[in-house]
Image: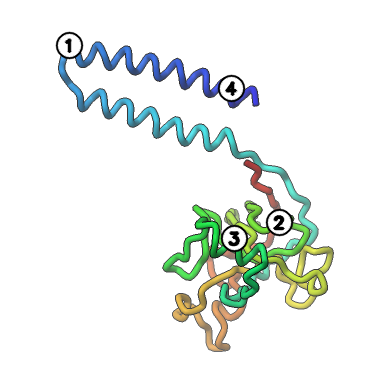
Amino acid sequence: MRKIIKTLIISLVMIAIIFINAKEVVANNDNYVEVIDEVINFFEELVVETEEVNESLISINVLYDSSTKTYMDFRLITSKSSPQYNYIYNLGLIEFCNDGHLREDEYIGVALGSYFGNIGDKFIFKLDSGIELKLIKLDEKNDNHTIDGFIHNEDESVIEFVINEDLMEDKRAENGYIYGGNFNNAQQYKGKIIEIWKVVN
């Protein structure tokens, strides 16, 4: 809270300085474009800084360091009374992207176990390849199909991407599955889980 207040105070001071400078620039040079650019640049930087202030990370214990990453088609989520259906279709937050992924901003939609909280919770998964995946929980794996609500008890996946299969037809392997049934076969998702952070606003 103190950090947010400090940021707001600094922002107000900077706004005052900008408009004082703007008044001098306009009076001396009539250079309105310079004034406008200066104000726009300041507010763009302020938005980024505010987003960083309002977002923090909480470390989550990694119970299993799986590299397997399966997938499901988003159309399998059919219960209109479920929180996952509501989040995907009714809140206006989810974008159906051309690459087949469902996203909220930069966070990719996935199914996770109950260990990972509620629908809409966001996480950053760090892999041993150095890749960091920004993920949002759009569906929940059945506890009867997981160990500790964390990892699937048969395919050993932690992450299950929620996708539009129609837009990933070019990624089907000879066995008929996208990336052969495991997104770990794609370089951009490759690696075992070594760290997990929950994103808290």
Q: Mark 4 points at which residue?
A: 5
Q: Which residue is drawn at 75% across and 49% down?
A: 60
| Quarter residue 84 falls in | bottom right
To which residue does mark 1 refer?
28
Q: Which amino acid does label 3 sit on?
A: Tyr
Secondary structure, mark 2, is loop
At x 27% / y 17%, what residue is drawn? 22
Q: Of marks 3 and 4, which one's residue comes earlier in the chain?
A: 4
How far apart are labels 3 and 4 at the CA level?
Answer: 32 Å
Lower sequence index among marks 2 and 3? 3
Q: What element carries label 3?
A: helix
Closest to the observer, 139 or 149? 139
How far separated are the C-alphas under marks 4 and 1?
Answer: 35 Å
Labels in figure, total = 4
Left or right of 38, for residue 180: right
Q: Residue 88 in the image: x percent, y percent? A: 56, 63
- Tag 2 residue: 118
Sequence-wise, which precedes: disc 2 or disc 1? Answer: 1
| Residue type pointed to by label 1 | Asn
Numbered disc in front, either 3 or 4: 3
Q: Residue at x 76, y 55 (%)?
A: 62
Q: For residue 191, which quarter of the picture? A: bottom right
The local crowd at label 3, few if under 14, some if 14 to 19, many if 20 or more residues have their Cα within 10 Å, is some
Dot 2 surroundings within 10 Å: few (below 14), some, or many (20 or more)?
some
Q: Name the residue beneath numbered marker 3.
A: 87
